[in-house]
Image: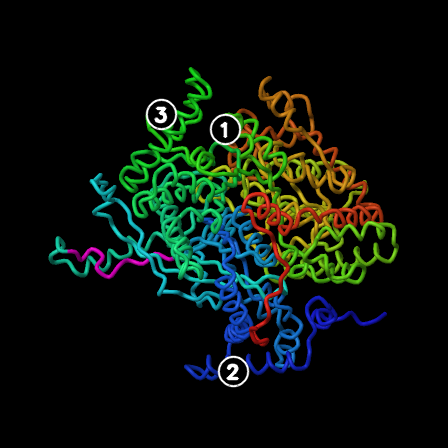
Amino acid sequence: MAVPLTDSEKRKQISVRGIAGLGDVAEVRKSFNRHLHFTLVKDRNVATPRDYFFALAHTVRDHLVGRWIRTQQYYYEKDPKRIYYLSLEFYMGRTLQNTMVNLGLQNACDEAIYQLGLDLEELEEIEEDAGLGNGGLGRLAACFLDSMATLGLAAYGYGIRYEFGIFNQKIINGWQVEEADDWLRYGNPWEKARPEYMLPVHFYGRVEHTADGVKWLDTQVVLAMPYDTPVPGYKNNTVNTMRLWSAKAPNDFNLQEFNVGDYIQAVLDRNLAENISRVLYPNDNFFEGKELRLKQEYFVVAATLQDIIRRFKSSKFGCRDPVRTSFETFPDKVAIQLNDTHPALSIPELMRILVDVEKVDWDKAWEITKKTCAYTNHTVLPEALERWPVSMFEKLLPRHLEIIYAVNQKHLDNVAAMFPGDVDRLRRMSVIEEGDCKRINMANLCVIGSHAVNGVARIHSEIVKNSVFKDFYELEPEKFQNKTNGITPRRWLLLCNPGLAEVIVEKIGEDFLTDLSQLKKLLPLINDEAFIRDVAKIKQENKLKFSAFLEQEYKVKINPFSMFDVHVKRIHEYKRQLLNCLHIITLYNRIRKDPGKSFVPRTVMIGGKAAPGYHMAKMIIKLVTSIGNVVNQDPVVGDRLKVIFLENYRVSFAEKVIPSADLSQQISTAGTEASGTGNMKFMLNGALTIGTMDGANVEMAEEAGEENLFIFGMRVEDVEAMDKKGYNAKDYYDRIPELKQVIDQISSGFFSPKDPDCFKDIVNMLMYHDRFKVFADYEAYIECQAKVDQLYRNPKEWTKKVIKNIACSGKFSSDRTITEYAREIWGVEPSDVKIPPPNIPRE
């Protein structure tokens, strides 16, 4: 038998990683050594691994800057319509490998680093994740930036440069403990501060209505300092910009005339202003009405809109063409996409600038605002909807409150004209919610102030039209669209699963990387013995690699030949990690009851962070770790069942675990998961899905055929019917002996012998107030899992379904999603023009 290739030898054989030409390799080595020399000359003479990482990062960055400058120059010359993607989260992960992939430099760098006696993968592991997001919404923004650059759109991501991103998760005694994510500690080689574009943002103050218009006076000023990060497209020489704002106190902060003596305290108080960009709020799908969060939302919006308007006014034509002092053409040159309601203040802020500053007539300003803005809805959970107290607005943003009242009044007048006498409709459609605490409904504001509103999967967009915004849909049906989410195949296939990417390239070429629908060309190979073998072999290699990683990093030994059953996402009741737990315990009980029987060995891996204030989510983590403690120690079970909680799940961890998964769990209650994107990553990487008909699972089943996924449980209609009839968990508990046994074990302290009452809150919730109806889907889930086992016993048939899934995953590229946004919302066409690289002179 041949000696297996080392990782590094394997990597060199992968053609899509770029040709490692001698000239390229020599140039990378030379540049690397130069950067390393300048790092060391300053203070040390012994290089650490981190020094090598920074030298490589700066070498790769050098290849970006020429393209970056040229791209921005090209936009200035051509003056295309610009797309502004506004988001409070950009969950970017690591940048080094993604940049090498998109620039086609990976093999050159690998070879150069190898020649210098270093290992590329070891250096890649040193980089910190940019964890400026919670989960799906923030990661979607990151995939969208990659696709917009790859499609040659003049697009900009705008957000906040949080000093501390999503917390690092430690598991101590089975409980989640949070640790601050000091990701900038060693510096960030990918960002460039742009102090020359620093802008003021105003808070508090008072409004004065004068003869020459409205004035917002006596405000507190915070400065917004931009940091730019390059966003390279895939091998098209386009490099777009992500601009993140950091809060700076002005130098006269708290030192104005009224502050006589306490200079020291005044300087210390600068922190109060600068706290705005200190930390990411760690809530996923939950609204926490804190003033600091509202400040963050206005901060990013106010800075970004000033920047957008400056760029609109100073673009090339603006120099000579008087048209640019008129805002008539603004919507033809600017599209603003609101990623959920978090940047909703863009609507009143744009109105404030147009009306108060630029003296545009109100109705004209409102027309411009609506044509410019579009809103993406990400959730239907009521607890996630942003509803800010009017009292907080009044204090923090008094002019914006006035504008919102005026906008709302005109809107309600319009509704009243269309539906005379329907006061309940007026109440439902108002931006202002009356009650003990008057609140501003930001979702209603977004719908009114946008020309397009979209959901993120077909089923979700239907729920948006027929329930969440039903009244608005009846008023303006043409506003509502669907844009099913997608993922970038560069990071989520080529980068994280080069082995699979390579066997696909061998069969169909590499064009699929920018046109994922071409994966359909794999369909004729479903019965090709050699291809089946190749795909199964890559999966097994990925499982071995991930097993080694788990053993090295977390000291857990797993059976790499067991089924890898993976459930990774934020911990939330609606995502039903508890349903998975019930299956694990059921399986455990069956093995103990009949230890002689043949069972398909499984390693169940559950991972994800719980919001620090979400008690039930933290209890769910404790339950998973406690089940693991019992199951993993039981000699009767052996290695037929192992339960692992994956600590500190994040983008860089996803890139390791997803390629190794056999089974992907997507088991939210139907009608609760807007789309999901992890589901798509698993599909593309050769896992089979067990899931409900929720979110994008519905479209995945449609693309691949329902028989090629493990679909179970209630549909949306069944859930609605049960809501009408009433869900009674006790009925299931009494009727299903295996379920009763499981709940009694959790309840009695079988999994928490030192603290028998540990899980009483979980049991109480499941039995008496479970909004997500875990027991109602228990039987169907257990039966479906038995079908999973049955198929897994037949590796060849399993792998055929895997190939079918991969071949049908093309729809779920974010390139397709962004192409639809571009054509149907932004009114621009993607372009495959390749900007000439920096070494070719401009014509």
| Residue behind mark 2 | 34
> Is 801 drawn above or below residue 51 in the view shown?
above
> Is 359 drawn above or below residue 264 in the view shown?
above
| Residue behind mark 1 | 472
Q: Give the range drawn in magenta.
A: 246-256
Across and down, in percent, residue 747 comes to: 57, 31
Q: How many marks?
A: 3
Residue lying at the far top of the rendered structure: 421
795 horizontally vs 424: left or right = right
Q: Please report whichever mark, 2 or 3, sits nearer to the chain's N-terminal start.
A: 2
Q: What residue type is labelled 2?
A: Arg
Mark 1 vs 3: CB contact within 8 A: no
Q: Please report whichever mark, 1 or 2, sits nearer to the chain's N-terminal start.
A: 2
Q: How far apart, in angstroms, are the residues tagged by discs 1 and 3?
A: 19 Å
| Residue behind mark 3 | 434
Across and down, in percent, residue 722 comes to: 61, 21
Q: Nearer the viewer, residue 378 or 232?
A: 232
SS at mark 2 in the image: helix
Location of residue 555 by image quarter = bottom right
